[in-house]
Image (tube, rainbow, N blue to C red):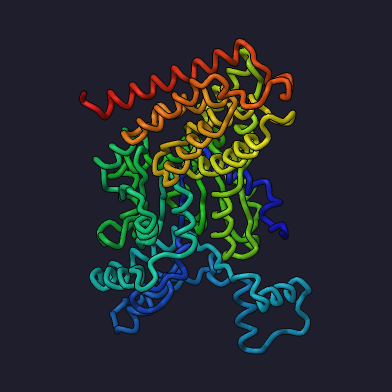
Amino acid sequence: MKTRYWETDKNFYELCDMVAKGNLVCLTGSGISKKLKNVTGDNLPDWYQLMTRIYEKMKEKGTTIVKEKEEIITDLLSMEENKALTKLECILELLKNETIDSNLSGEDKDTINEVLNKKLLPVRAATKGDELTGVATLLRSIDQNLFDQMLRDLVTIQGEKTTNTHRAIAALKPIGIMTYNYDTAHEEAWNEEGTAYGCYIPSDKDKICGLLRDGFKKPFILKAHGTVDDIKSLVITNESYADLFTKYSYYKSLVQDILMNHPLLIVGFGMSDPDFDRIIQDLFTTFGGPIQKHMVITHKSSRSKRDILYETNYGFRYLYVEDFEDIPEILKDCTKVPGPYINKIMEDIVAGGENTKGVEIRSEAHIRLKNLSDVAKRIIADDLEIKIQDNMALFPNDSYRSFDLSEYVYSYGFLIGSSADQYGSRKKFMIEKVIEKSRDPKVVCHALYRMADHLNEDDLQTIRHWREIFEQENYFCEKNYIDMPVMYQRTDGEMESKIRNVIYCMFLEAMVRSKFYKN
């Protein structure tokens, strides 16, 4: 299978680790919603397009705009240093008009070829947020009701409710999503996933304080600039931006908590919002450098010297894509590919043998294992199932590793009953299969131990059956020991494990009786 370009980027594997550790927060902007349609039938706009369309529609409707305001609005929207058209878009305009200069540079010709081959999407240059909030303030002062209605129409989704990127983000199972978008696509994506979540806007003081107090126990969506479902909540004018830091200081505390204690995955966000810029600058002023590592997925054409500054000062890493359409596939791979963190856990759960140091290493690995995201637990469960089945098939050959198998089974038991785990019954079945098929008493002992927390009423007869067969004298030595490798010949320890297995069965039987039977 051909290696894809992101598989050779170390930042992709760092992103896999961020997803695995179970405390990821995703931050998104208008870029991920551009393919959705609004009630006017157009694609959802970015911030610059939103202000431009409202201004144009006001003029179409004959709204009276005094000359001074109109001049300021047009100046802000067309400022040379913040122009909306990139060089690439200018080239595309020339293509349409068939007026391309034959003396174009080789770089420009390559750019044109990439566009014609659909390998590169035009990227709109980020217009500074301060200018656009000024435009919004002026436009809303002209006709508040008309402004609000146009805004609602332009950002309300009609038709397809989510994009592949929204669905891929939902599948990562982050503990939260912080979005600067007004639309409801993230809510729709989590509804499709069946994820229970809380939704918050900056003015939700009690709910935000509860979220901070509870330590993000429940997945959340923070609509940092409000939601189209509540037009009054939208942060878009100078006044509403000022409110974020004067009236809603608890909102700022929440965002600071997220940035300090959680890795961010940033998608579709131009890193030019005044609100966000102020918060990351405040953290830099306070701490003098980054506390967390964050990952920005963006197009390779947007690479700039600013990226180096953001990495040094604020901890942002960059995963550059060749095509925005690759982002959902990259995120999907993060739910399948183990990064260095998971690989280290897999090494440590069989590390060190029976000595004290080994026990300590494995215990620490089990703690990390329990704290992984459900996505990472599925990756490890799939890998452990293969290792368990392959190892069981080797018994009693010389290549069979009793210690490794017993530790794989023990670690696998931690994955049964993971929160929001649709594979829980499959994992329990796997442990039962080990108990019934293995002839290694130490392996069975670990499997029985891991079953204790996952019993139900129907397990009573099964446990009785296990005890009966374990009590058989030669159950754990089907073949004559003369024919087996020396390491499997009967020892006092092995007899002790056999007796322990019978005792475990009696213990499990008693647990089921006490839990499910009154008499």
Q: Quadrant of the C terminus?
A: top left
Q: Position of residue 2 (x, y in %)?
A: 72, 60
Q: Residue furthest left?
A: 518
Q: Residue at x 68, y 18 (%)?
A: 489
Q: Residue at x 65, y 24 (%)?
A: 351
Q: Position of residue 178 (x, y in %)?
A: 41, 50
- Near-viewer residue (188 or 107): 188
Q: Is residue 62 left or right of residue 99?
A: left
Q: Is residue 9 left or right of residue 436?
A: right
Image quadrant in which you'd find residue 59: bottom left
Image quadrant in which you'd find residue 205: top left
Q: Quadrant of the N terminus?
A: bottom right
Q: Residue furthest bottom?
A: 98
Q: Residue at x 40, y 75 (%)?
A: 53
Q: Is residue 257 visible to the viewer in this orientation of the structure?
A: no
Image quadrant in which you'd find residue 294: top right
Q: Position of residue 518 (x, y in %)?
A: 21, 25
